[in-house]
Image (cartoon, rainbow, N blue to C red):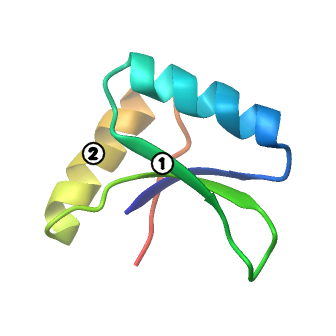
């Protein structure tokens, strides 16, 4: 998975998800029990190399993307 953001405000995650979907990304958002934040993610990917390629594309599109295990 590639994480785009972890936010506390549902409206913030909705805006981000909508923007990413408009750009053609398969995006999801869910609240993590461990930290209470809404995590906005792209994926899953079949391997780490694919995830890293998407991370680079997201970075080029102006998003702060990080790989998740």
Contact, CB < 8 Å: mark 2 with mark 1? Answer: no
- Residue displayed at 77% across by 34% down: 12
- Quarter that holds the C terminus: bottom left
Q: Name which of mark 2 and mark 1 comes first in the sequence.
A: 1
* Viewer-side residue, 59 vs 46: 46
Q: Measuring from the top left, give residue 25's x and y in whole percent.
A: 34, 33
Residue at image mark 1: 28
Cα separation, mark 2 vs mark 1, equals 15 Å
Question: Which residue occupies the foreground of this view, 59 or 14?
Answer: 14
Q: Residue at x 15, y 70 (%)?
A: 47
Q: Is residue 46 above or below residue 26?
A: below
Residue 11: horizontal and vertical position, in percent?
79, 33
Q: Which residue is mark 2?
A: 54
Split into 4 quadrants, where in the image is the N terminus?
bottom left
Report which quarter residue 33 is drawn in. bottom right
For the view shown, which residue lies furthest in the top direction?
Answer: 22
For residue 16, side relative to residue 3 (left or right)? right
* Residue farthest to the right, as pictured: 9
Q: Tell me if residue 59 comes above or below residue 42 in the rendering.
A: above
Label 2: state its secondary structure: helix
Q: Position of residue 29 (x, y in %)?
A: 57, 51
Residue 21 sits above or below residue 44 on the image:
above
Residue at 43% across, 37% down: 59
């Amino acid at each position: 998975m590639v994480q785009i953001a972890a936010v506390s405000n549902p409206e913030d995650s909705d805006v981000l998800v909508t923007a990413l979907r408009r750009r053609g990304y398969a995006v999801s958002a869910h609240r993590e029990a461990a930290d209470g934040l809404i995590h906005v993610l792209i994926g899953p990917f079949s391997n780490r190399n694919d995830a890293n390629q998407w991370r680079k594309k997201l970075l080029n599109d102006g998003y702060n993307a990080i790989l998740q295990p």
